[in-house]
Image (cartoon, grey):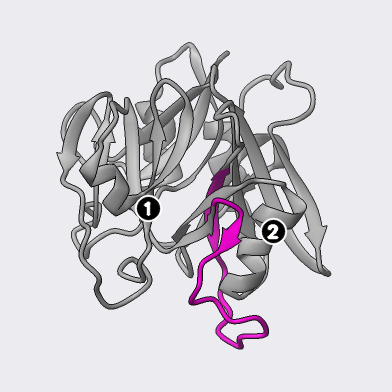
Amino acid sequence: MKAIFKALLLCLLAAPALAQEPPACRDLSFEETSFTVCEAALGDDIRLWLRDNAGALIGTPERLAQALAPDEQLVFAMNAGMYSPDRSPVGLYIEDYQEKRVIVTSAGPGNFGMLPNGLFCLGETLAIYESRAFAKAPVRCRYATQSGPMLVIDGALHPKFIDGSDSLNIRNGVGVSADGQRAVFAISNEPVSFHQFARLFRDALGLPNALYLDGSISRLIAPELGRADIGLPMGPIIGVVAPR
């Protein structure tokens, strides 16, 4: 039954193969652990979604497919950060230049409050900012999502990560190149520690800044890989769209 549902879901999302070389998403192995990474460039149509035009929460791959215009197709998407029980973003959330949720700079329980945390911003460049620094000197973002903790901060791992930690989970996040022209979204295909996940971005992908997005609820939709992860409805979603 699950296989049938997945096949139907991919039919909703899939479209003629994208003329893109190399593929946007690919699987890779890092330290004998499987990950999937999806790349986007500054000039790509990167978006955040929370609600459709009628104000209803999107949350699922099916509803995301319905939110696209007839001449659009999804390249990939994943959950864009942590959210409250009502599926609203926990921290800063900007969609098409409109601030829907304010930034949170205080420490707190859970991964989000493990300072320093940060935000991903699509502005003049692609960037990841530490939250408190951004609050003091904000820049204009067309899209932004806050989450935490930071994984990599100017080439250094978050100071609270422990090498060899037995706190393992499925995790997803995003890293940005030093020139702000490229973002890499990654999800682990098996449980990993924060330390290993951060090293994926720094050591395997060569990215100086990276942000954790979420854990056990992490999901990826990647039609070119035939992948549409099934799980609970998501809060904010981030992804890339291309013309059909």
Residue 163, magenta (yes or no)? yes
Residue 17, given in percent of the width and then of the height, sits at 71, 22
Please name whichever residue, 234 or 109, is drawn nearer the observer in this view of the structure. Answer: 109
Q: Quadrant of residue 75?
A: top right
Q: Mark 2 sits on what residue?
A: 200
Please name whichever residue, 205 or 47, is drawn nearer the observer in this view of the structure. Answer: 205
Residue 114, given in percent of the width and then of the height, sits at 36, 71
Q: Mark 1 sits on what residue?
A: 118
Q: Which residues are magenta?
A: 154-175
Q: Amino acid at mark 1?
A: Gly
**Which quarter shows the C terminus?**
top right
| Residue positioned 51% across, 67% down in the render | 158
Residue 169, given in percent of the width and then of the height, sits at 56, 75
User: Mark 2: few, some, or many residues within 10 Å (few <14, many ≥20)?
Assistant: many
User: Mark 1: few, some, or many residues within 10 Å (few <14, many ≥20)?
Assistant: many
Any mark on residue 99, and which? Answer: none
Q: Secondary structure at mark 2?
A: helix
| Residue positioned 22% across, 44% down in the render | 136
